[in-house]
Image (cartoon, rainbow, N blue to C red):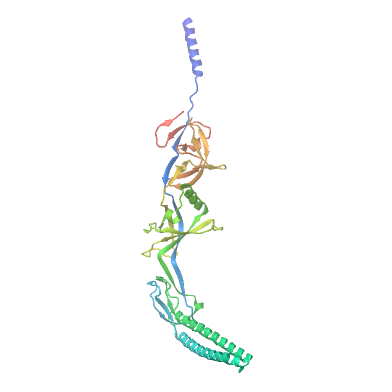
Amino acid sequence: MIKTRGLFFLSLISLLSCSEQEPQITLTEVVVDSVMQATYRPSNQLIGRIEAFDDAEIKANVSGYLLERNFTEGQFVKKDSPLFLIDPSPYQAELAKAKAELAKAIAADKAAELNFNRGQELRPKGVISAAEMDKLTSESLQAHANVEAAQAQLVKAEVNLAYTRIKAPFSGHIGRSNYSLGDLVGPESGALTTLVNINPIKVIFQVSEATYLSYLEHKVQQGDKHSAAEDFSVSIELSNGHRYPQQGKIDYIANRVNPDTGTIEGRAILPNPDNILKPGQYAKVIFDSTAELNALFISQSAVQADQQGTYVLSIAGDNTVTRSNVVLGERVDNKVIVKQGLNAGDVIIIRGLQQVRPGQRVSSKHINSSKATNR
């Protein structure tokens, strides 16, 4: 009986001892990564429109019948090469007439000047009256004016005659002719043809205001005083997915933001020796920085957002989850730049985000390690 009671009390003590032990708590396991500081070369991609470096409509400045077309459509022509000849005969006649009118005016001017000089000699002697002297003076001035008018008509006639020979204003590729030989053309006829210079060639692109401000912010942080042309090299990807072999430079940034689109226009110049690029094409414009910048990077998978803004979940020293509001910059591959809210080396959750909340203790495993920490 005594032995049975002893066993009973021993069992009771053992049971009470087990009930006083702290229960085991299973912590949620999450995968974490560290905020990394690294250098990078900023890169951006935009859609650009290709335009000719020079683009001109060739028009007639005088009216007449087309007598000659001195080019092959689509071919390269050099500057000042003859393109069209408009019948010059009416303008040659106008020039001859202008020369004759000038000679006539010069002769009249000489006669008026002789009369004026003679009147100046006779007036002091009282041979002619003051009224007669005034008339001689007026005639002399009128004769001088007639000479100047005739000279102007001669210049106009020479210019009109020169306009009958239409030349290339610059070297480039000529388009098709919109008129045939024998057609009557003039200033109201519109373009006779077009001429484009496509080597080098221009690429026009639009930069968002936010992207431009981010670029300026980086320049200030780095103390960079270079121009955009020095900061970036430009290349393009064609519609077939191939990278164009030639690189270019930014040569123009607009001095204002377009209020309708919120963008700033830019322009890059690229060599085009083989005439691969044509005006009117669209291409992906790739901007690669020529300088390295420093920044903090985190995995894109760590980023969350709610009504309070963008944030990540960080791990404190005791493995407690905390919320860290962040300001992000541009994406670089599968990483994103952190401008504010984190420091290099901070530990953030990248997997298991939906299973935890701020204030909760977790078991964390670094993405680059197979060992979990549980504190």
Q: Position of residue 250 (x, y in %)?
A: 44, 58
Q: Quadrant of residue 283?
A: bottom left
Q: Position of residue 205 (x, y in %)?
A: 47, 58
* Spot occupied by residue 262 in the image (x, y as percentages of width and height): 54, 56
Nearer-the-camera pick, 189 or 212 = 212
Where is 179 relative to 355, above or below?
below
Of all residues shown, which one is farthest toward the bottom? 127
- Residue 84 falls in image quadrant: bottom left
Q: Is residue 205 above or below residue 149?
A: above
Residue 124 shows up from this direction: yes
Residue 224 on image: x %, y %: 45, 50
Q: How many marks?
A: 0
The residue lying at 48 percent from left, 14 percent from top is 14
In the picture as drawn, the residue positioned furthest to the front comes out as: 125
Q: Is residue 63 visible?
A: no
The one nearer the camera, 257 or 142, is 142
Q: Decide: is 240 above or below 99.
A: above
